Image (cartoon, rainbow, N blue to C red):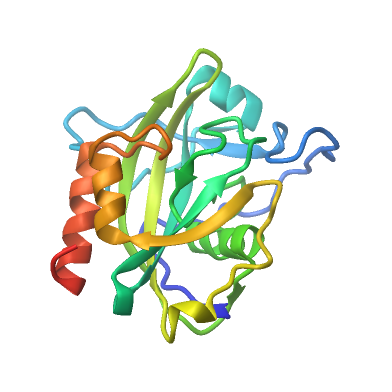
């Protein structure tokens, strides 16, 4: 299947890519990959931001997640309007944040030199085996997210996209998933996803209340009661 995209106003391309070390450690993520870092959001942002502004530096992933620097990521939600269902991925056991939990259809960090929409397409290809091309990818909003554990402090600006799948749900087998990042893929009813997130089910990656409210309001506006 092929997936296309619409470039959001928040997307940026930052010129030449810095040389990166070759990673040969555990699968799931490369701690040496480079992230652009940004100033923290202004007080009173309400969970969303219109523009991250220009980066103030570049750091390796391992230090960004250690120091709590603000960086950018993408979320791509795949929905099947005909069945009011959504695709979820189960994160690999190798992930340094939220391993073995059900999460957004496809997601990833925006590395140094990459744009938002390009990263969204790349993640769909790497994680779910979907090729870029025909289906429109729509930018919805940019969320402000903070997550921390004893070893990780992840502060992100998340560009959120929506892809509506056409045809029959059975057409989408997701048999080429990137197993070092994703261990399983499944459709579930949108109403069940909302319920699991609202009740903070431990098997699902948590989303802030503002994120949940806006996302499900958008889906209700398109599909009716969900």
Residue 101 in picture, x, y percent from top left: 49, 39
At horizontal 20% and vertical 27% (from top left) the residue drawn is 43
Q: Looking at the rendering, in which quadrant would you find the C terminus?
A: bottom left
Query: In the picture provided, is 168 more to the left or to the right than 118?
Result: left
Residue 48 can be seen, yes or no: no
Q: Residue at x 46, y 45 (%)?
A: 102
Q: Nearer the viewer, residue 24 or 13?
A: 24
Q: Position of residue 17 (x, y in %)?
A: 70, 50
- Count every numbered label the image shows and give the total: 0
Residue 225 placement: quadrant: bottom left
Q: Answer with left or right where residue 140 lies relative to residue 55.
A: left
Picture layout, residue 38 above or below residue 120:
above
| x then y, percent, for residue 120 | 52, 60
- Rendered position, 4 above or below 158: below
Indicate left or right for 210 with 183 as reference: left
User: Along the horizontal axis of the image, is 90 left or right of 164?
Assistant: right
- Picture coordinates of residue 42, whole percent (x, y): 25, 31
Instruction: Name the quarter where the N terminus is drawn.
Output: bottom right
- The answer to which of 49 and 76 lies nearer the viewer is 76
Residue 51 visible in the displayed image: yes
The residue drawn where x is 44% and y is 84% is: 168
Up the image or down, 13 lies above or below 205; here it is below
Q: Residue at x 69, y 66 (%)?
A: 176
């Amino acid at each position: 299947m092929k997936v296309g995209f619409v470039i959001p106003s928040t997307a940026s391309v930052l010129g030449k890519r810095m040389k990166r070390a070759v990673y040969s450690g555990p699968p799931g993520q490369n701690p040496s990959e480079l992230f652009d870092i940004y100033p923290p959001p202004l007080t009173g942002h309400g969970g969303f931001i219109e523009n991250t502004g220009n980066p103030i530096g570049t750091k390796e992933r391992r230090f960004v997640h250690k120091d709590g620097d603000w960086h950018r990521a993408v979320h791509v939600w795949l929905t099947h309007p005909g069945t009011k269902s959504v695709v979820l991925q189960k994160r690999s056991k190798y992930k340094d944040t939220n391993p073995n939990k059900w999460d957004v259809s496809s997601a990833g960090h925006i590395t140094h030199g990459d744009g938002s929409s390009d990263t969204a397409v790349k993640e769909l290809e790497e994680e779910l085996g979907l090729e870029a091309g025909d289906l429109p990818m729509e930018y919805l909003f940019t969320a402000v997210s903070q997550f921390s554990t004893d070893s990780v402090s992840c502060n992100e600006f998340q560009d959120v996209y929506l892809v509506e799948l056409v045809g029959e749900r059975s057409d989408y087998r997701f048999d080429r998933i990137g197993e070092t990042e994703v261990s399983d893929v499944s459709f579930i009813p949108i109403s069940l996803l909302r319920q699991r997130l609202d009740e903070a089910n431990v098997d699902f990656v948590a989303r802030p209340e503002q994120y949940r409210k806006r996302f499900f309001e958008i889906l209700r506006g398109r599909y009716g009661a969900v």
